[in-house]
Image: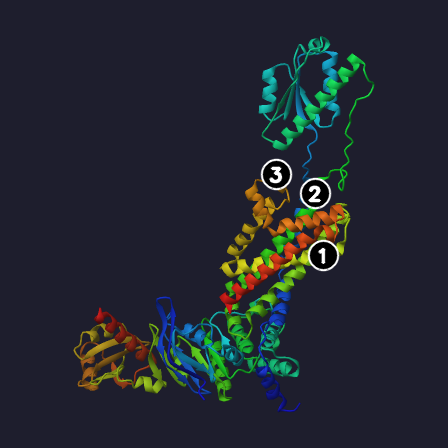
């Protein structure tokens, strides 16, 4: 080798104009090694979301069936037994005990052995046959609101139907009921909770992962003192930032692919729309979350603080994004908050594409909003990062 | 051109002045030792020289570049090694070196050449594939030096490079520094070790954010403030050092005295001959006492200067 070559090469490096993204590539390579070397972080990133997916997919069922019911049949007649059969046949009620007094009926509910109590009064058949209004007492445990609602609705429907049938047989005017609803549930024919929950959960899990990992990546360097060393080198703040977030964007994408695979082949939720569109519309969301993670990292001084910060952003996303509770029923104020949470839009996009075969024409507004948010967050965090570090 | 030049450089954090009107100049190829108690402003000065902190007043130039306006140029040309091990523990030795080489923009044959040179210089070859976190203290510092030196900097800032490593590793590290220094690399080293300070070409001593001494070790020892006119320094050797110290502190001729290893160092009136002190001690029950006059050590210098400043501060209150 020409001995003069080396000073030339060094001179070339020194003469090179510093670009604002200086250092991005070596930082990126290093970060990739960190990810590979840290089995605990990999475990958290891949396994925990999958575990949550399995829990929610298999264990949680929000539809109410087989409500435990106590019965006090004071009439003991053919009519009263016919009415009780209607309750049993509805699949919504499961009769767990028969009691002989109002007090016992009450106790069954207070003790939690039954959620619903049905009392048929002694004069039930007499009033019915006399053409008067017979009454039926339905006690509902209001401490579980979904059960209470379901019990009331079904009990009312059963009573109405029984009334109509009785009217028809008494008057013999028509052989058929005049009106009947034929409900057809679109997009989720079996009303499976998993179909409703899993697409939303994908959005939440991507959020946890990207925010937490990005926040930790910077804070870890600060804790170890390596950040201080980096400041003394020609690495530029933007270079450090890009090098830090790109690997986690890749991890987030890989994670999403794994979860989509499980969704399709384990939970049997087909993606009815375009997978390409879905993967495309995730990009601005991931950018937003990486920006959020960076913002947290500029404030947090320890890994603990970073984790707390990441969880702080999680809670509103879980409760106000429409993931579990519908936005439509929220008061105005919370609806406004939910409209500034990025997750709200990604959940709409996921449910739209996966369940309803929605296309870009239906989802362009969500995509646009997420893009604006992404641009906003990454710019703000870059500026803050620069100020704090550069 | 000087390697480092500051003029009345002042750095403030809010109300607190961390570096107060410090003026130093470091020649090229020199090993400049920067000493001072913890929190006196050593690291702050290094940070402001690398452009990480804005000076409130005064200016600094490093390798001819302005510390504020040309910080990027400076960072590309200097190496920095901090007191704490600040490399990536989960990366191997080789990966750590590659990372810093990448940061400094090295590539191709130049990268290979430099990496080879850094490994040879630090004898890290057998450890290349070991995780940096598993190295012992001395080897960690060698790796830090290899990383900080990968881009052939003309100036190296070493912030307490030998804190917490064993004496053998310390000696070896200094041999390395001398070797590099002889090839024209300038070193700016902070340390608490007096023996390391003795090895430096020149020394600055910073106390309460102010530079209170600056010069070669010999110049500092001849500083009239350290050995005021009319006084001299002697060393007293005896088996019974601590008892002798108590006795001697009561004597008229003694201005101050302290135990120094197996002997006593005393600052005394010049008017009293050494032979007289020796005779006095023999009579006082220390028949083996031998007294001879000595020059102050660097520790004497710093302790005396610090004490006189403390006295001034107290006196002005």
- Residue tagged 3: A329
Nearest to the observer: residue A51 or residue A233: A233
Image x and y of residue A154, in percent: 69, 26
Quadrant housing residue B272: bottom left
Q: Quadrant of residue A240?
A: bottom right
Residue B256 appears anywhere in the view: yes
Residue at horizontal 78 percent and vertical 31 percent from the top:
A182
Chain letter for mark 3, please: A
Q: Report the colour scheme.
A: rainbow
Q: How many marks?
A: 3
Give the percent coordinates (x, y) of residue B288: 25, 80
- In the rendered structure, the residue with mark 1 lies on which chain? A
Residues marked 2 and 1 touching at CB (< 8 Å): no
Image marks 2 and 3: residues in contact by CB distance under 8 Å: no
Q: Return the residue at label 1.
A: A279
Look at mark 2 in the image and give the residue it sits on. Answer: A196
Quick check: can you spot residue A225?
Answer: no
Q: Residue at x 68, y 40 (%)?
A: A59
Q: Is residue A296 left or right of residue A118?
A: left
Of badges 3 and 1, nearer the viewer stands 3
Q: Secondary structure at mark 3?
A: helix
**Which labelled disc corresponds to residue B18?**
none
Mark positioned earlier in the residue sequence (3 or 1): 1
Of callouts 2 and 3, the N-terminal one: 2
Marks 2 and 3 on same chain: yes
């Amino acid at each position: 080798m020409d001995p003069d070559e080396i000073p030339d090469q060094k001179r070339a490096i020194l003469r090179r104009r510093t670009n604002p993204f200086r250092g991005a590539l070596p930082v990126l390579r290093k970060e990739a090694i960190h990810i590979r070397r840290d089995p605990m972080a990999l475990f958290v990133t891949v396994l925990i979301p999958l575990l949550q997916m399995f829990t929610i997919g298999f264990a949680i069922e929000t539809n109410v069936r087989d409500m435990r019911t106590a019965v006090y049949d004071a009439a003991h007649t053919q009519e009263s037994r016919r009415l009780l059969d209607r309750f049993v046949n509805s699949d919504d009620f499961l009769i767990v005990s028969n009691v002989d007094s109002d007090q016992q009926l009450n106790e069954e509910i207070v003790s939690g052995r039954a959620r619903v109590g049905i009392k048929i009064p002694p004069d039930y058949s007499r009033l019915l046959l006399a053409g008067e209004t017979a009454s039926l007492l339905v006690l509902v445990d209001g401490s579980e609101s979904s059960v209470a609602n379901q019990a009331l609705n079904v009990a009312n429907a059963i009573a109405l139907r029984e009334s109509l049938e009785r009217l028809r047989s008494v008057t013999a005017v028509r052989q058929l009921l005049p009106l009947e609803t034929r409900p057809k549930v679109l997009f989720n024919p079996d009303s499976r909770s998993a179909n409703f929950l899993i697409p939303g959960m994908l959005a939440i899990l991507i959020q946890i992962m990207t925010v937490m990992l990005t926040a930790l990546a910077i804070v870890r360097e600060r804790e170890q003192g390596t950040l201080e060393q980096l400041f003394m080198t020609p690495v530029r703040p933007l270079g450090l930032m890009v090098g830090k977030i790109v690997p986690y964007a890749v991890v987030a994408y890989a994670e999403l692919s794994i979860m989509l695979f499980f969704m399709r082949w384990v939970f049997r939720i087909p993606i009815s729309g375009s997978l390409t569109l879905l993967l495309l519309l995730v990009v601005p969301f991931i950018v937003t979350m990486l920006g959020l993670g960076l913002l947290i990292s500029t404030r947090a001084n320890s890994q603990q603080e970073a984790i707390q910060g990441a969880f702080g952003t999680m809670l509103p996303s879980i409760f106000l994004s429409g993931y579990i509770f519908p936005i439509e029923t929220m008061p105005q104020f919370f609806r406004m908050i939910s409209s500034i949470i990025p997750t709200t839009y990604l959940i709409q996009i996921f449910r739209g594409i996966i369940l309803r075969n929605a296309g870009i024409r239906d989802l362009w507004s969500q995509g646009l909003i997420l893009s604006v948010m992404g641009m906003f967050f990454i710019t703000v965090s870059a500026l803050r990062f620069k100020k704090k570090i550069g | 051109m000087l390697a480092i030049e500051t003029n009345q450089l002042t750095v403030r954090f809010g109300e607190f002045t961390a570096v107060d009107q410090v003026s130093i100049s470091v020649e090229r190829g020199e090993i400049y030792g920067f000493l001072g108690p913890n929190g006196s402003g050593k690291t702050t000065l290094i940070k402001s020289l690398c452009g990480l902190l804005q000076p409130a007043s005064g200016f600094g130039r490093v390798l001819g570049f302005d510390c504020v306006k040309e910080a990027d140029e400076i960072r590309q040309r200097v190496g920095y090694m901090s007191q704490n091990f600040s490399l990536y523990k989960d990366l191997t030795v080789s990966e750590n070196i590659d990372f810093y080489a990448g940061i400094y923009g090295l590539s191709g044959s130049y990268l290979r050449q430099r990496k080879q040179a850094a490994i040879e210089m630090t004898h890290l070859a057998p450890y290349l594939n070991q995780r940096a976190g598993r190295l012992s203290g001395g080897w960690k510092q060698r790796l830090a030096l290899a990383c900080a030196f990968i881009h052939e900097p003309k100036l190296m800032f070493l912030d307490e490079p030998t804190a917490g490593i064993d004496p053998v590793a310390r000696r070896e590290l200094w041999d390395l520094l001398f070797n590099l220094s002889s090839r024209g690399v300038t070193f700016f080293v902070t340390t608490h070790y007096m023996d390391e300070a003795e090895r430096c070409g020149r020394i600055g001593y910073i106390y309460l954010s102010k530079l209170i001494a600056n010069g070669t070790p010999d110049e500092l020892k001849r500083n009239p403030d350290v050995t005021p006119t009319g006084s001299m320094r002697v060393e007293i050797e005896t088996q019974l050092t601590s008892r002798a110290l108590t006795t001697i502190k009561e004597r008229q001729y003694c201005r101050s005295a302290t135990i120094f290893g197996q002997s006593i160092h005393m600052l005394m009136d010049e008017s009293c001959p050494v032979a007289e002190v020796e005779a006095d001690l023999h009579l006082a029950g220390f028949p083996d006492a031998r007294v001879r006059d000595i020059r102050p050590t660097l520790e004497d210098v710093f302790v005396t200067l610090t004490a006189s400043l403390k006295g001034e501060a107290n006196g002005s209150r």
